[in-house]
Amino acid sequence: MKPVNIAIVGLGFGAEFIPIYQRHPNVNMYAICQRNPEKLNAIGDAFKVDTRYSNYDELLADPNVDAVHINSPIHNHAEQSLKAIRAGKHVACTVPMATTVEECKEIVKACRETGKKYMMMETVVYAREFLFVKELYEKGELGKVQFLKASHQQDMDGWPDYWPGLPPMHYATHCVGPVAGLLKLEAEYVSCFGSGTIREELIQHYNSPFAVESAHIKFKESDLSAYVYRSLFDTARQYRESFEVYGSKQSFEWPLIEGEDPVIHTAKKEEHLIPERVKVPDYAHYLPKEIQSFTTQGVYDLAENSHLSFVQGSGHGGSHPHLAHEFIMAIVEDRDPFPNVWQSANWTSVGILAHESAMQGGKLMNVPDFKSIFETAAIYE
């Protein structure tokens, strides 16, 4: 199969993926798109990408583009994804999928109608910690999974544009994704409570008062539920994306402080021997050798591209090359990516509906059956 011609849309966070795609054996890093021509050309020159667009519609009209990887602001995700799918392009999109449940439904239907792939690029389900727990589960070392828990706490003061006052659960996929994704569970309904109050100047943006939102998720056709909580403003906490799993044989708990090792609890030992700190390995061996280095180092060669003002880290638990590889191989192998379109819609809608629940005092909110919506949508002939 010929290499997949990919275009990256949005060159802030999106620029991290350029050299990953450039080195992937099944990809031609074909084009970039950025509204600001100066930034577009700076990035294009630095990474030697010749095909450049400052207009998204013109990019979509290019018949050479097979797939787009969207890294635009949250409120553009649904519109740009729908345009690309309907233009015959496969879509990878940074989180979340959309800002409304109806937009999620439209994307699910569009993929069914066109046969195009959609993957929400949720970093946590490809982070080394998640891959470590997934390996424990698949080997049977956790035993029967009994409960899942996750959090995402971040101080967003000073962030520009649409971020001030954003309802915490509107950006919940970093904690919903891992609790649903480990056992490939589908959220059926959710109940959420708000707690505390943010500053008045923040509340006015979205009419959302809560400092913290905490939700319980019930999974369909499962005896399992999960607990997730989020905060973005006026809550003192070091940045944390945590994921915890409690099993009958072993449980995995995230460290309280960044940089510490997580803890495995093993049942039926002497009490003082139950907890043990563990080193989480890297999972670069899952990847083609050409992109393995991107799990543990920055993507930019700062010596060569010193004019770039930002220094890159290893990136979300080493997830970026895993995300890119999964999306590309789903196209190459003509299969669903993980998460696929209806899983992405499920994870995103949990957060949207959780905030609605919090605004109504914890009311139970049913999550649409996106899998059925996908399976019953019309197919274009």
Image (tube, rainbow, N blue to C red):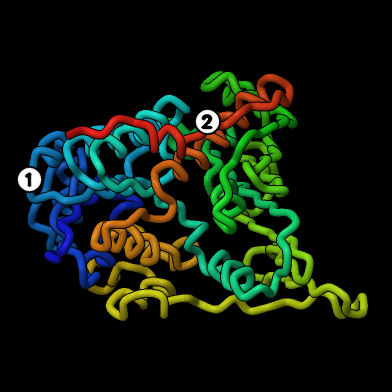
Give x and y (percent) for residue 306: 26, 66
Residue plotted at (71% across, 27% down) = 197
Give x and y (percent) for residue 289: 31, 80
The residue wearing badge 2 is: 368
Foreground residue, 16 or 124? 124
**SS type, badge 2:** loop
Placement of 281 over or under 20, stated as above or below = below
Of all residues, the one furthest to the right in this rendering is 271
Viewed as shown, does residue 184 lie left or right of 27?
right
Q: Residues within 10 Å of mark 1 (few under 14, many from 20)?
A: few
Residue flagged by tag 2: what amino acid is it?
A: Pro
Quadrant into which the N terminus falls:
bottom left
Viewed as shown, does residue 319 lie left or right of 260?
left
The residue wearing badge 1 is: 63
**SS type, badge 1:** loop
Q: Earlier in the sequence, mark 1 or mark 2?
A: 1
Disc 1 vs disc 2: Cβ atoms closer than 8 Å?
A: no
Give x and y (percent) for residue 75: 38, 31
Residue plotted at (17% across, 34% down) = 381
Placement of 304 over or under 345, stated as above or below = below
Give the number of the disc on residue 244. Answer: none
Viewed as shown, does residue 125 lie left or right of 320?
right
The answer to which image quadrant residue 280 occupies is bottom right
